[in-house]
Amino acid sequence: MSDWRLSANSTIYREALKATESIHSPAVGFVKPQDITGRTTEVQFKQNNTTIQLLLKLTEQIEDLKVAVKRLEAVKGKEGTQPDDLTDSLDQIQQQLQKLSLGELIMV
């Protein structure tokens, strides 16, 4: 998203504003300087709360991804190992192939 208006309409952004609304209403995210009606520091505090909420949401998502990656690695690790009976079966087949003969070699 390259335009702030697209970001402002995203679900994550709206959820962050809603989550910080109870701290001091109204929650503030993107602001145009001419729209500031209160004290600048008050707006900055509200924006910082929204920023913190967004960062925490990202952190949660990263942690969820880490757990998912560990699960996938565990599954991949299990698939990557060969059972002992497979190795034994391959050894038996190799021994049988070594004994295989097409008969006497006849030279013409």
Image (spheres, rainbow, N blue to C red):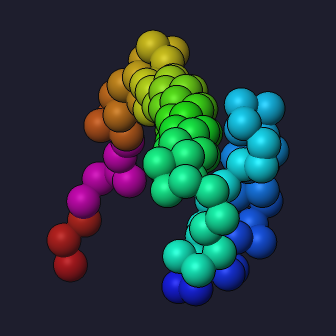
> At 67% across and 81% down in the image, what residue appears?
5
> At 29% across and 53% down in the image, what residue appears?
104
Q: Where's residue 59, x and y in %?
A: 51, 35
> On the rendered structure, is 54 left or right of 95?
right
Q: Where's residue 45, x and y in %?
A: 52, 43
Q: Which residues are magenta?
A: 100-105
> At 52% across and 30% down in the image, what residue appears?
63
Residue toward you, 43 or 100:
43
The N terminus sits in image quarter:
bottom right
Residue toward you, 57 or 21:
21
The C terminus sits in image quarter:
bottom left
> On the rendered structure, is 5 left or right of 2?
right
Q: Quadrant of residue 21?
A: top right
Q: Is residue 62 visible?
A: yes
Residue toward you, 40 or 66:
40
Identify the residue at the far bottom of this view.
3
57 over 47 or under it: above or below: above
Q: Where's residue 2, x and y in %?
A: 53, 85
> On the rendered structure, is 18 left or right of 23?
right
> At 71% across and 31% down in the image, what residue appears?
23
87 over 30 or under it: above or below: above
Q: Where's residue 90, x and y in %?
A: 42, 30
